[in-house]
Amino acid sequence: MNKGLRNRVLIILAVLAACLWFTFPVQKRINLGLDLKGGMHLVLKVDTEQIKNANAKSDAVLRAIEILRNRIDNLGVGETVIQRQGDTEILVQLPGVTDREKALSLIGRVAQLEFRVVSDDPTKLNEALSGKVPDGFELKKIKKDKETPVLVENQAALKGDMIADARVDFDTSGFGMPYISLTFNDRGAKLFGEITQKNVNRRLAIIIDGDVLSAPNINEPILGGKAQITGQFTYDEASSLAMALRSGALPVPMHVEEERTVGPLLGKDSIEAGIKATVFGCVMVFIFMLYYLKAGIIADIALIFNFLLILGTMGFLNVMLPGSSSTLTLPGIAGIILTLGMAVDANVLINERIREEMRSGKPLAMAIKNGYNRAFSAILDSHLTNIVAAVMLFIFGSGPIKGFAVTLTTGLAASMFTAVFVTHVIFDVLLHYRKLDSFPMLNIFKETKIDFISKRHICYTLSLILTIASIWVFFKKGDTAYGIDFAGGQIQEYRFAKPINADYLRVSLEKAGVKDVVIQQFHETPDTVLIKSAGDTYNEVVKAFKAAHPDNAFQVLRIEKVGPIVGKSLRQKAFWAIVLALGGILIYICFRFKHFDFAAAGVIALAHDVIVALGVALMTGRQIDLLMITALLTIAGYSISDTIVIYDRVRENMLLHRKMSLYDLINLSVNQTLSRTILQTTVTYLVVVALFFKGGEVLNTFSFCLLVGFFCGIYSTVFIASPLVLIFEKQMKKKT
């Protein structure tokens, strides 16, 4: 074995060892996203509109982040993410936290504590009750007793920023009711002592976030720096409030702009569905690649290496760069499956090129070398254009979508390494040890001489009808075309212990006053219901379920809530992601092929694929959400990959057949790559079908769009993009 080959083998072994090291044990090396292990993803909007100074606004957001971190640390949640997003938003991710009410109560509570002196002057109180509140006072009612009015001074005598500690204690009266025991810092203790000393036999109102919890009488000066807050609390209420008071008051209010809560049961189901889809897809691909016999076995080895390389890279990033975006999400699993299908494309291209070289009479070693060299440019171009789409997903996506972008990009890079480098080395080693004296392959697809270009007018008409129909459906549906990701609203998914009737649930909700909701139930899962609403109806829905169906326990699978402002922002980001992806692909093809007509025809064809896939999805009752946008960008990358393979062959044939007309050159190129097109379409469909049937409900729309879009991609490459090049070329000649 020569030195060069030995070094290449050592590189592969080193990479394989590193992959195994950073992959196993999987549960320690690979971080699971919230959609797989359960938890909460929140985007909080800090209300800084009342703050005029720009620096003060920024300080308020930073102070809010600090307080949130203190509060969440008290929850004991590991691997949390709390980071600023934009000017006034905070991203919070809480892995494993599924107690939605407790988390939202703790995070969203301002916890602004005030002590205000109460006026017991009956004249002033009567004036206030009649609507004439005296200057310097404010009329309030005790929270637990709305019938008891109290007139409090406007100015707080003492605020919560002087609290050193807040704990839950229990009274010793025999009822054991919880209360909050406060300890002030030195300055607070002194001030509290002065206030109580000056106001003996008067009442002191304890106010949190504008609500009067209680207004006890000051019987004597309290000089020990301690106080109590009572208010008929439950233990959970007292514990949550004490925790908020300990961490400090938020400088300004916050509200939830976006929420994605995934219960542990749905996370478990998603993992099982992802594993089934991966295994099913991989097995079908491995079997299919045996079409190439020996070369197919080598390709299967490369695919296993490819899979390990993706996981190893994610494990490496998690170990070396904690907090990176290399988290495995459910769309990320879909990305791994898709990249395995795309990796096969590179192997198909190489094997078909080797077959052509052998047909021309080249010796086996020369045929393998030439096959790799001739396939490389098409493989590189197709992978890079897919990466352009993945980068757009990463920039404009969020949460699980970023996970998809990371695994897709990692998988594409791994595919280049395994398909172009690893398999080549395996061939060279086999040749060196004389273990490869022949290269048999099945050959179902014979050479064809179909005049594809002559069918262009029929195909243009068909595509125009489909495109117009898709655009018409989109505009006809209007705002109803968008899911909650883009329109705003809330989705709640529940699983009952026993099958439940959706109509019965609807009646139960209407009786409880919950109206204007959409209830969906699927035939294959009669124990599961999906509820969509414009606003947050979670508390009312849960209360209605418990009251109407006490003998049928249920679990929360997921809750997704998006505010209208966030929805509008996400819609704009999705639009720009698609536009910039198309623009990036256009620029890249112009650069690589030095012809604007090639690039324009390719982008028109993939725009056609995206529009038709979107239209068909809407026609089947699906809505546009983040996963659909992910699918559309994936379609764009896949579609242009097919086009590039034909373009690459056209470019090559232009040098070999200088006197042949462009019409004949395109037909020749399409026919020469037809077997690759059919084989790649088949193998990609195998993995997408695995996603569609085994990937679970969450990935159903995603995989459906891919099924439609990938078919459109093959069709448009042959019947739209290629003929358009001919038309553009003719127009260019007329102008010159």
Image (cartoon, rainbow, N blue to C red):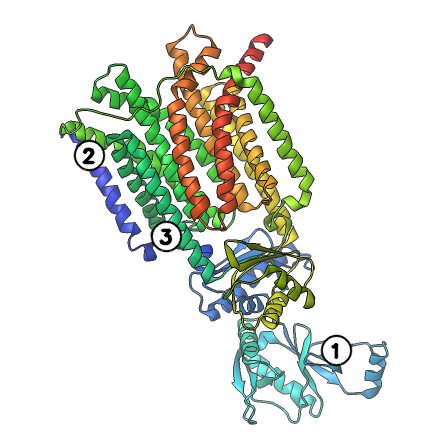
Can you name the residue that lies furthest to the top here? Answer: 659
- Residue 227 percent across, percent down from the top left: 58, 85
* Residue 309 tag number: none
Residue position marked by numbered label 1 in the rendering: 140
Corner quadrant of residue 334: top left
Corner quadrant of residue 285: top left
Q: Is 123 left, or right, of 578 in this rendering?
A: right
Distance CA(mark 2)–CA(mark 1)? 81 Å
- Give the quadrant of the N terminus: top left
Q: Secondary structure at mark 2?
A: helix
Q: Dot 1: within a 10 Å radius of its alpha carbon, few (fewer than 14), some, or many (20 or more) residues?
A: some
486 to 375, vertically: above or below: below
- Give the quadrant of the C terminus: top right
Rendered residue at 58%/12% (across/down): 731
Distance CA(mark 1)–CA(mark 3)? 53 Å
Residue 4 visible within the image: no
Residue 29 visible within the image: yes
Rendered residue at 50%/16% (across/down): 453
Q: Is 307 left, or right, of 464 in this rendering?
A: left
- Residue 446 percent across, percent down from the top left: 35, 19
Residue position marked by numbered label 2 in the rendering: 7
Amino acid type of the residue that numbered disc 1 sits on in the rendered structure: Lys
Residue position marked by numbered label 3 in the rendering: 318
- Residue 90 percent across, percent down from the top left: 55, 57
Q: Dot 3: within a 10 Å radius of its alpha carbon, few (fewer than 14), some, or many (20 or more) residues?
A: many
Amino acid type of the residue that numbered disc 2 sits on in the rendered structure: Asn
Q: Secondary structure at mark 1?
A: strand
Rendered residue at 53%/87% (across/down): 170
574 to 148, vertically: above or below: above
